[in-house]
Every structure is written in structure tokens, then in C-alpha cells.
Image (cartoon, coloured by chain):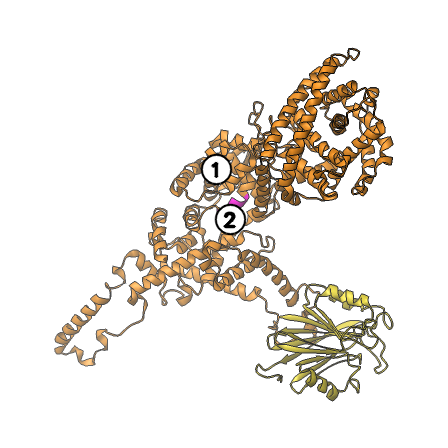
Chain colours: A yellow, B orange
Amino acid sequence: MVLVLALGDLHIPHRAADLPPKFKSMLVPGKIQHIICTGNLCIKEVQEYLKTLCPDLHITRGEYDDETRYPETKTLTIGQFKLGLCHGHQVIPWGDLDSLAMLQRQLDVDILVTGHTHQFTAYKHEGGVVINPGSATGAFSSITYDVNPSFVLMDIDGLRVVVYVYELIDGEVKVDKIDFKKTAASTHSAH
Amino acid sequence: MSKGIAKEEEPPSAGVAPAESPAFASLRGVQWRVNLGILPRSSSIDDLRRVNADSRRRYAGLRRQLLVDPHVPRNGASNPLNLVMDNPLSQNPDSTWSRFFQNAELEKMVNQDLSRLYPEHESYFQMPGCQGMLRRILLLWCLRHPECSYRQGMHELLAPLLYVLHIDVEHLSEVRKLYEDQFIDKFDGFPFEENGDAYNFDFKKISDSLEDEIGCQGNTKKVCSLNDLDPEIQAIVLLSDAYGAEGELGIVLSEKFMEHDAYCMFDALMTGARGSVAMADFFSSTPAAEFQSGLPPVIEASAALYHLLSIVDSSLHTHLVELGVEPQYFALRWLRVLFGREFSLQNLLVIWDEIFAEDNSPLNKVSEDCDYFSFNLADSCRGGLISAMAVSMILYLRSSLLATETATYCLQRLLKFPESINLKKLIEKAKSLQILALESNKAPLSSAFGGVYKCTKSPTSSHSVPSGSGSPKTARSLLPDSYWEEKWRVMHKAEELRQNSLGKHTPSGKKRWAERMNFRPSRTESAPSSARNEKCKKEHHSVRRSFLEDLTKQLGLEDAAENGGCFETSNSEDHHSVEAQGDGQNSASKGSISTTEDRCENGSGAVVSEEKSFFPDPPTPPGCSINDHEIDSEKSSSTSNLSVDDNGDLWGRSPEDLQHRVSLPSDDVPRSPLHENESSGRTSSTKERRNLSGKFQWFRKFGRSNVSEETSDESGGTNETAKPPVHDSKRSTADSSVVDASCNSHPTSKGDTMDQNMMGTLKNLGQAMLDHIQVLESVFQQNQGQVGSLDNLSKNILVGKGQVTAITALKELRKMSNLLSEM
């Protein structure tokens, strides 16, 4: 039972000062085993903060990140699942499912996590899952209006992953849950 | 294998089995369950089965309820409202996830202990199935009793219970093999199955032949019906009958329900089942409300042990008390695990047979007389037997305990109970003491805990045992919650130190100085020795009180063995800490500073030996303040002279130390001119004196320094040639500040590093001491000649006396250095 936190597009300090306090109170060290971050943190302090939550931290480079040495894409295996990580500004049109599916096939992953659109989406597509955790701070985006702070927590348990989505809507934390199951022998996952 | 074990079990328990159910003599599991109160004592098998089934149901319900799988939705489908509560990051303590995380923490603790359980019986206890059962039982019990939570040792109480059940099941399977048909449902071969016209006249013939057949078959198979069996086997069969009361759930010896049964046993044992002795109390650190004393139950129980011991064998009791062996050091482990760690598993089972056979109901509820205190442990037969057992164990080691003079050795003996013992005798003795324990449960309050913290009533005036040993300092608090391994490690380290300083026998006892300081302010007769011992430490460490307290604790941890260990080890500590600061200063060639540091430590050693032989002398405060004045002069010139490179920072600290130290004493004696004259021609001897006097500033509080000062006086008097005082003062400030620095850095350089360099430093120490001694002796000889010529000094007489005592001290030093160099 592995808990993986997926978040990104914080844009601290340029577009937002900090995570919303309600989110911050929920993120305590000790519960989460991995953190994957789509990018645009933007400064080192944010990386250090995330490091205190969990030592296993994976970040890909967003276009506004100060740290230039993050990779463009990253793949990792957690349990039975292969995860892929990318910021998403490289994939055009931004947020387009088919283009993201191309990236998923290219990286050969079951779960693809990208950001940049500052909007939460989760698609089941061709046996895989494409997740966009949105912006954890609700930072301004030029392509989306009404950005709500959101992030994603994945509970990977064997062949099944439960995706919890935490959104801050009107000052309240709303939680939603999505279940994905992976069939054992293939990379395609069924519902 | 189990058959052999079963056979072993039978003889001792056979005599114990209560009259109603002798059939359970070979079934420990059942016997214990009856004794612990889980199963009724009635002879009806049906009752047994019913009660058993009930308890199992309860456990199953508990298990379902408390073992949380967060993935399984508790109330059907999860709607958004639940999700806000039930997500993994939820801060809500009621959510399934937070309970899951709490359970995970508890499980981690339990796993740690389980992995170390009974490594010698690995084949059973480390099996994943067994471990899983143990884990679940412990988890559930702790979740059920959150006030106790999980403590180390609970797993060791549980393990033998499970083992016993396992043995029973194995026994059952063997009986099964022997008496197959009692267990299997075979209805072939009965006459009814023959054709219906068996009832014609031919029947007789057929039935005869059939009966013959059946008879032969039966004879080859088994005896007869159930009632012809051995009552024991009969009981086993009935207990395991799948068609008896409650069906399969009621089968008393069942592998499937071993976990349930073990849980019930464990629960009964821990909560005492409405009886008097509840093991869970021994794990709690808070005093229970209903007890009279404000003590944690384990301490009280240990006091009960000592109380019984004092009645039974007062000499041993006083001996242990004087050594400072507090009962809870060893009794904690004994009681918490019910002697589980002192005996091998088979012996333990025998002992537990006896203990569980005793009734646990409380004997006397309230003691009317408030002057009297009754121990809870001796309040029931079972408790009485437990304390009697403990006392008989102590008595078993009587001779070796009386022979040792250190608390460490005593505890070593007590904590490592010998393997091959005459268990029968031990148990018999315990039984005989049990009566005594129950009767003597009323103890006057003052002496009830005499052995524990207050002054003991035993006569100590004549006691001058040079049992120099600090009891391990780990148990300073009321209830040491640290595990016994920790304590053992500490003591073992202390033992190592003791071994290293082998053969050093400080005469006339540094008695348990640290303990004296912390525990027993009322032991007035040992006050001078304690003062001396404190001084011994103080000469090495800072004068500041609180600092000293911390250091004594550390020292207690590190050199528990005091016979010579104190000063050697503290010397080497200083030595080592000096090493830690600079590099290899004991290996010379750092100029004069390093050699003086060497000598300063040796000088301190010398002083120690001197003071040891001087202890009957009364303190003379004026004598001590000489050094203060001297230090004043030193201090003025000290700052400019502190230019030692490698100890730069430490030197920087030393002036303040000096100042601090100087400011403490009150009176001043105009003897300073003499000390100015101390600046002598002979560097080594004056440095010596300086070192000695530098050390004495620490003694002024206890006024031990009279004679030493006189030695320095005399040297000052004799050495007329003037060396620049600045130079010498520099040296002595260096010395004093070295020791300061060493003591300042002492807390940082812990004893563990000390151990490593112990040997090397001791050897160097021995060598340096030898040189030192030679110098001192030569000086004395010269001074002896010169003293006579100085008739203007009125202190000549004093000087002479001081000289003599100094020489004797030197002789002792020499002996010590010989021993050291032998190592």
C-alpha cells in the first residue's frame, strides 16, 4: 500500500506565495512514500519543503523552474505500475488527450502525470491513465480561468490504484476518488 | 519430539492438577486455561466446550472489528461526504485511515520485538504463521487496552502460552494416530448395513460370522468403545469431538482456533481475571490508584520481594541493600516476563504450571491499620508464590551474592541465572516460602520500602565494605523503562572498565559515590567517604555543581566499578579527552605543555592516592585557600600566556573557569609569599607542586588539601631560587585549564570513545606515572634534607608530617603504576 503524491505548477514565488493552509495542514511527513512533481515549482525552497514531506522526490522541469537540471521526462516503477512524469508544455496542443497519449506510448507507462494546464483532469485512455493534478497553489494560468488549487494522491495497492483528488473549492477541501485496475498480464488496464 | 516433551510435562504437572480434572494432566493448554479462569473448573466436558466457544467468538468479533483494512468501505458505498473524512491524508482521528496509520505504528513496535523472540527455538517461533498469530494477538490486545499500549516483554509472556497450545495440538494429533476410530466417522462394518433379511433364522449364523469378522477387525483396530479408554484419552477424544457441544467451535484442542485461545489466555494473564495479580500492572509506569503506595506497581512488587527476603534471610538482604542493589534492577525483568528470561522454555513451563495452579483471588482486601502496608503482590496465593519464587531464586544464588563486593557483580549473577539448576528444589523452596510471604504481608510502612529508597534499618555503622561500585546509573529514576539489554550493556561496559583497571584496589572504599549523592543523603556515616569520592571526581571535572551532577551520572554510567576504576578511568577519560582535543598530547613532544598535562593528570592521580590515605585527617579550610591566592596570581598572568595552538579555544575558556573557581571560596590566608617562592629552580618538581596545588583548588570545599599544600609549602620553602613566577604560573594555568578543558569537553567525549583508547592511554599513563613518582621521590628526599635546615618556618612540624604522608601516597602510586604497566 503505497501512497504517492502528485502535484505541480505551484509557481512560487512568482504567481503564488505558498500552498493553501488547508492543503499544508494535510501534508504531514510520514504518510507519503513518494512525491512526483510535474514542474514549475519554481524555487529551491519549494523543493526543500517537498523533501521534508518525503525523501523520495521526483521532479521534471517546467518552463519557469529556476533549477535547470531537472529532466524533461521521468519514468518510475512503483509496485506493479509504471508511472511517467512530464511537465506538459512540451506536448502541444497543451492538454490534448491524443498528444498526451502519444507521450504515454512513447514512455511506455501505465500512468502518465503531466501538468501545465493548471486544471485537474483524469482520463482512462487506451488501457492507461492520464492524470493532470492541476496547480497546487491555484496559480494564474494564461489558458485556464478560475483555477482551483488541487493535487492528487494515488494509493497503489497491487494491481489496483485509487486516485484521490483534493480540490480547494470555495475555501473547502473536496475529495474525490477514482479507481483503476490493471490486468495482470498486459500493459493495458481495464476499468 | 512433542511426544517426548509431553512426557516430560506429565510428571511435574500431574501432582498439580486439581482433583476435578485429572484428565488434563498431560494437556497443559487446557490445564492452564482452567487455572487462568478462562475455562470453568467443572468436570463436564460440555461446559468446557461451551465456554471455550464463547471466548473464541468474542475474539473473532474483536478481530473483525479492530483490524482495519482501509480499502474495504465500512458503510457500503463511499459517497463524497465520507471521502472528506476517509481519505488517506485526513487529519480526522476517527477516520479509517488514521486508525490504519496508528495500527501501523503499533505493528512496527511489535514486529521489532517479535523478530527477536526466542531465537533458540527458532523452528517454531520464527515461523511466519506463528509470528502472524503473535502479532495479531498483541496488536488486538493493545488496541483493546489503549491505556497500556504495547511494552517490550509482552511478547515474551505470550509466546509460551501459544507454545503450550501448540504442544497440545501436537499431542492430540498423536493420540489421533493411535486411536483413529474414535475420531473418524466410519460407519461401515455395522451389522445394520447388512441386508434387511438379516433378521431371519439365518441371522444367527450370519451374524455370528459377521461378528467374528467384526471382532477380528475390531481387535486389529482398537480396544472398544469410548468408555473403555484411558480417562485421559477419553477426555481428549471428547474434547475434540466434532459433534460435541458447540460443534467445531467447541473443540477444545484445535489448531484452527489456537489464536483465539492464546488471546484469551493472554488476556486473562494480563488483566488478572478479576484476581489480584495482573501482569499488565507490571508494565505500567504510573502508580495505580488503588494501591497504597504512590509507586508504580513494579517497584512496589520489587519492594515486596525484598521485604520477604528480609524476613527469610536478613543477612543477604542487608548485604544486597548495602551494595545498593535495588530490587527493581533485576526484579523488573523477572516480574514483567514472569521469569521467562531466566529459565529455558521447558523449565519455564514447569514453573508456570506451579504459578498458574495457585489461586489468584485477593486474600485481604483492605488493611485496616494505616500504619501497615500490604503489598499487592502478596495479596493472593499466586502473587505469594511469585514473590516466593523470586526470593528462592535469590537464595539459590546466595553464596555467590554474598561473596561479591560490587553491585555490578551481584546484578550480573542475578540477571544471568545459571542454566543448569535443580528446578525441583527451587520450586519446593518457593512453595515453602509462599506461606511465609502470605503471612508476612503486613509490613510497617517505613521499612516496607527501606530497601528501596529510604535509609535502611539494617545496621550499617560497622559496615566499611570497600565495595566501591556505583550501581548502574540507568535506574536512577523510579521506574527505569529502559529495556534490560540496555542496562546490561551499560553494566557490561562498566565491567569492561573494571577489567581494564584490574587489580586496582582503592583502599577504604569509594563507596557508591554517585548513588550516595543522588539517593541517600541520610547515610551520614559515609559522608566523608562520599565527600572524598566527590572530590575525586571533582578534581577532574568542573567545579560547577550542576555540571558535576551531570558528569557524575555519566561517570556512573561509564565507570560503575569503582575499585580503582574511578581514578584510572577518569584519568584516562581526561587523558582521552585531552587527546580528543589536541592530538596525542600524551605522546610528548608538544613542549612542556604536554608533559605538564601528563603530569597534571598523574598529579591528580597522585593527589587521589594521597587523599585516600589521608582521609582520617580533619579538613582545614585555611589550607585550601592558599591555592586560591596562588591562582589569583596565576590568573592575572594567565590570559597573556594562553597561547597553546591546538587547544586554543579551550584555553580561551579556561580563564573564566579559573575566575569562577576562584570566586567561590571565601577566606584568604596570607600565605601567598610562600607560594611566590614556589617558583623554583627545578622545573619538574615545581611543576609537580604546581600541578598538585593546581588540583587542590577543587578540594577546598572539602578541605582535604591540607597536607598536599604542606608538601607544596615545603617545596616552596626549600626552593629559594626564583624562576619567573609568570612562567610557572603559565604552566600551572595551562595545567589547570587543561583539566578544565578536559572536563569541559568531557561531556562531549563520551565514555564509548573512552573504551577504545583505554588500553593505550592506560599504558602511557602507567609509564608517565612511573616517571612522575621517581621525580616526586627524589624531590622528597632532597626536601627531607632541607627541611631540617629551615628553622624559621613554624610549619616545619606540619611539613614533616605532610612529607611522610606524601611519601606513603607515593608508594601507593608506584604500586598502581606497576599494575598499570603490567597490563
Q: Which mark is residue B394?
A: 1
Which one is earlier in the sequence, the residue at label 2 or at label 1? 2
Front residue of this view, candidates B736 and B263: B736
CB under 8 Å between discs 2 and 1:
no
**Residue assigned mark 2:** B337
Quadrant of the drawing holding the N terminus of chain B: bottom left
Q: Which of B691 and B751 is in front in this view?
A: B691
- What chain does badge 2 belong to? B
Q: In which quarter of the image is the C terminus of chain B?
A: top right
| Label annotation for residue B183 | none
Q: Is A167 drawn above or below residue B133 in the view shown?
A: below
- In the rendered picture of this protein, how many numbered marks are placed on residues? 2
Give the extent of the magenta segment.
Answer: B332-340
Quadrant assignment, res B232: bottom left
Tell which residue pokes out farthest to the top in this image. B791
In this orientation, does residue B687 appear?
yes
The chain under label 1 reads B
**Residue A3, image x and y in percent?**
67, 70
Q: Quadrant of residue B462?
A: top right
**Of the residues shown, which amino acid type is indicated by label 1?**
Ile
Observer-nearest of A154 and B61: A154
Q: Do we see residue B746 in this rendering?
A: no
Query: Looking at the picture, does residue B205 appear above or below residue B535?
Result: below
